[in-house]
Structures are given as structure tokens and as C-alpha cells.
Image (cartoon, rainbow, N blue to C red):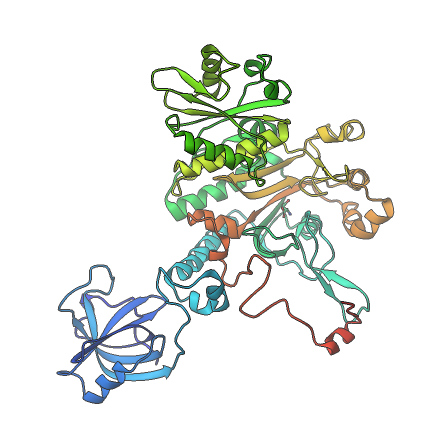
Amino acid sequence: MYRSNTCGELRASHTGSQVTLSGWVHRLRDKGFVVWVDIRDRYGITQLVFDQERSPKDLLDRARDLGRETVIQVTGAVIERASKNPNLPTGDIELLVTELKVLNRSLTPPFTLEDQTDGGEDIRMKYRYLDIRRNPIKNNLIFRHRVALEVRKYLSDHGFIEVETPYLIKSTPEGARDFLVPSRMNQGQFYALPQSPQTFKQLLMVGGMDKYYQIVKCFRDEDLRADRQPEFTQIDCEMAFVEQEDILQCFEGLTRHLLQEIHGVETGDFPRLTYDQAIRRYGSDKPDIRFGMEFAELNDLAQQKGFKVFDQAELVVGIAVPGAGDWTRKELDALVEWVKRPQVGAQGMVYVKCNADGSFKSTVDKFYAQEDLAAWARACGAKAGDLICVLSGDALPARTQLSALRMELAGRLGLRRPGEFAPLWVVDFPLLERDTQTGNFHAMHHPFTSPKPGQLELLETDPAAVKANAYDLVLNGNEIGGGSIRIHDKQTQETLFRHLGFSPEQARAQFGFLMDAFQYGAPPHGGIAFGLDRLVAILGGQETIRDFIAFPKNNAGRDVMIDAPADIDPDQLRELHIKLDL
Ligand code: ASP
């Protein structure tokens, strides 16, 4: 028997009992006549004591020599500590060791395995198995387990069945590139790894499974973006005989269950915004509504007063920044520079200080009287002491830029409070999106999403105006889930593929299996998928998803621990009939 108890378990009530513990040497303090060793496992830390009076000399010497992270097994008596440590759950006791066995030695770890480590990201990733021994990462993984368990409980209680779908498939378009897997048995042919189980879950509905879910890996070969993982986990769900409202109810319930179970937070009905409203009010389809700072359109108030920049703009749009009316000239200049950074891309910014005495001071005082600025302030909901920031230009970029500014300022002002949760639904997304470079349309969600009832005809005349039966669940400025009601008849699906630029032959070759299935009594159906990694990070009050994944890839898509991707043995390539021409 390696252990009778864990290293996190012993309390004053265990005093006098004989126990055996196994774990890692966390820390060692050698005072000469006494040696304390902290032994650590997943459950906690227990102090071991060896001393001149009570321990045999050779035992004391062996304890003294223990290196950090050595794996040991100890047996001894639980005794009350002379000086208790109230910060440690086991802090009332220590173990007077009578037997010490080294189970395995350890090299000196390349970084300290403390909550605050001295190890940088790269070294921690290379030795991830050591990083996982640290509390922050260990606790994140345990937290993830709890969230996943609650998801399974809720869905199972609501009649959902977890079904596994294959990983070696063919392309499922979700807007990214596929990861491909060459087939040895089928020369020159490739599998694609699923970007999502989308088509399979729809086929399960045709198969009568009714309510499906799966906590599942998805693979998307996307360009590098901070905090994206090429493989990530979805809570993937699908239901038959449902309308949008049924899905929103069901998954609002799931989200509420998680907030309740994990944080004890009660949430009322989730607000709903249409996509158009979200864009107009927050410049984003995933608005953070933990704070206000809503957009005010100022065209009527700010145009035709002689200020050319505004007169020529499609949109003049502003926000009130609470309490920023007394920022210094230097701070405000820096803010203007911030919006002009290429990542944000504004040409410039107008601002108005709402002074405590009710007067206004702006960067465009030449063109606007006090009453004009007072009208802006009313429109933005700015009070004395606030700052108004105004951007202008083409509507879409101006909104996107102001949204970036809104989030930045809210961050600086501490308005994005980590313990607060503000979920909402964004509904009525456009069905199609025009690629700014090619001018072609592509599906905003994916090509299996159905248009809103009665809008199919509009596809012929004004495709950009067609709204989809698609919805996103947004939490604290992050899209945590998205889905749609699907097309379930062959003809509509064919029409959609045509609008997406597929020839009938291409559509047949890629998705013939799905359209065939639709001809055998496909029920009306729809679903949603949540990004589990991000959901867990947000519920954990953090933003970095890597810290919630046991073995994540770095920002270049590499696993630096196992060193993948890697070169392939020429024999293996030959077997796959692949010639590399580098
Ligand atoms: N397959 C979709 C996605 O991965 C989710 C859905 O429509 O259910 O975003």
C-alpha cells in the first residue's frame, strides 16, 4: 500500500494515528537539529518532521539529502504542531516520520513549482507535466472537470444522449481550413478532421436520435490568432422537432445551471438583442453588457455645422466614458494615439470633457456651441465629470473601432468585473456575409443554416438582407455558443449551395450524403455548440484558454513538449504515396 491518506487530508483529529503518505518533496527546511519536509500530492501539502531527539540519525541525514520533487513514501505518527499554520488545511498537524522510502528521484525542475512561478510561458509549456503540479493549473483542470460534469448532468437530465461521431471524415465547412490526414489504403486520398460534427449530428436527427450532445474535439486550421487553439473542445448539441425558441430555452437553462452550480449566481431571463441592435448599440455581435457605455449616433446633432470630417462621414458615433472628464491632456492624447494604432485603425478621435460646472470643453470647440455639445451629452447619456469619445467614418469600421475603444476603456476603468456574469442572446444574424476581397457571399454561420421563414425568395433579389434562424450566446463580451435551425429539405439546401457558389456537381460531391438523407424523412431540427475551453476560462474568471487545457499548443500551433508537428520518416511518406517537394 503506497498511502493510507492523502497529503491534504490530515487534521488535528488524526493526532496519534499511524499513517503512510506518498508524494513529492515540495520544500525542505534544514535547521541542523531538525529537518522539515513538505510533502505534496494533488490534494495538498503535509509537513513532515525529522529531528535529533526523536529520529534515528541516519533517517535525519537521509531527509536532509532529499532533493526537490523527489517522490517519497513516508510512514509515521500524526502529531500536533507546536506552531500551527492557519493558512494550510493540514496546518494543525505534522508527521513524525519513522520510515522514509525514496520511490523515485527527480532532476531539479527548471522552474519553481509554486503558485507564482519564475518560469516563463515557453519553459512551462515544454515541461507541462511539471506545470500541472502547480496549484493554478491543477485547479483549472479540476475546475474544467467540474464544468464538464455539470454539463453532462444537465443534458442527460434533459434527455440528451451522448453519441460519438468520427474524426476521420471529409470536409465540414465552418469557415476554416481542414486538417488533412492522408489515407495509406486509398492512395492519393485524404480524410479531413472535423471542424465540427455538424453534418453527423444532423444525420443523427435523421436517425431519430432526437436529442444529441457530445463533448468533442474539433480541428480548425486557422491563421494564428492569440488564444486560439487548432484543436479545441465543443459541447456540441442537436435537437429534432424544435424551433429557435425551444433551443434558446434549453440552453439558457444549461448556462443558468452552470452559473448556479459553479458560482451560486442566480440569473434571470437572458436579454436578447438582434444582430442589428447589437451592432448599433455596441458595435459588436458579442457585446459585453456588464456595463453601459452604449453607442449614440450623433449624425443629426453633429453634421452640417461646418466640421468637414463629420459632414463627410456615413456615421458619427459616440460613447460616454464615466468619470473620465478630468483626464489630463497627456492621457487624452495617448487615447487618441491608441485609436489610431493599426490594430484599431481610426483616423482620429474627437472628445468632449463634461466639466463639473456643467460646461463642455471639446477638441472641436471651433465648430460647436455649448448647446450642441450639451445635446451630444444627452444623446450619449454623459453626466458632469464624464468624457465623450466620438469616432466617425464609414459605419462598419467606425462602429468596430468604437467597440474596441469601449472595451479598452471599460477594462481600464475596472468595469469588466470578473465575478459578474452578464449573458445574452444575439439573434437574427444575417444568413450570408460578403467577402470584402472577392465580393463572393459565404455563409455567416455555416451552409446548413436555414433562412428565417419567408425569406428564401429574398435570396434571389437581396441576398445580403436575408436573416438566418441563427443565434449566439454571449457571455461577458465572448461568444460562448452559437447555432441555428437547420435546413432539412433537399431543395432548400440545393438553393443555398447555389448561392454560396457551389456548382450542383460540387454540392453533390461534397454533401450528396446529407441531401440524400434529407430525402428520407428528415425531421425539422436545430442545435448549438459551445466552446468548452473558453466557457471554462470565463467561468473561471480568466481569459486565457491555454491555462484550462492540459496540453495546449502555443500561438504558433506547436506542441513544444512533444515537439509537434515534426518531420516524417521517408518510409512513412512513401507508404502514404506522398512526395515532398520542399
Ligand atoms: N457546428 C456549429 C459550430 O461549430 C454549431 C452549430 O451550428 O450547432 O459553430
Residue 14 in percent (x, y) is at 20, 70
Q: Quadrant of residue 460?
A: top right
Residue at 67%, 56% (x, y): give it: 194
Image coords of residue 441 (percent x, y): 75, 38
Q: Is residue 489 above or below residue 274?
A: below
Would residue 270 be visible to someone looking at this image?
A: no
In the image: residue 37, left or right of residue 563 = left
- Image quarter for residue 402? top right
Along the viewing direction, whichever of 278 and 414 lies nearer the viewer: 414
Q: In this rendered view, identify the residue nearer to me: 112 or 12.
A: 112
Image quadrant for the N terminus? Answer: bottom left
Q: Nearer the viewer, residue 204 or 375?
A: 375
The quarter of the picture where the C terminus appears is: bottom right
Which of the 4 image quadrants contains residue 168?
bottom right
On the question of residue 55 being in view, the answer is yes
From the viewer's perspective, is 79 left or right of 509? left
In the rendering, at what x and y percent does residue 563 appear? 58, 69
| Marker count (numbered) | 0
- Residue located at (53% from left, 28% from top): 349
Identify whether 574 is placed above or below 448: below
Residue 40 sits above or below residue 234 on the image: below
Q: Is residue 239 left or right of residue 171?
A: left
Residue beneath the point at 75% across and 66% down: 182
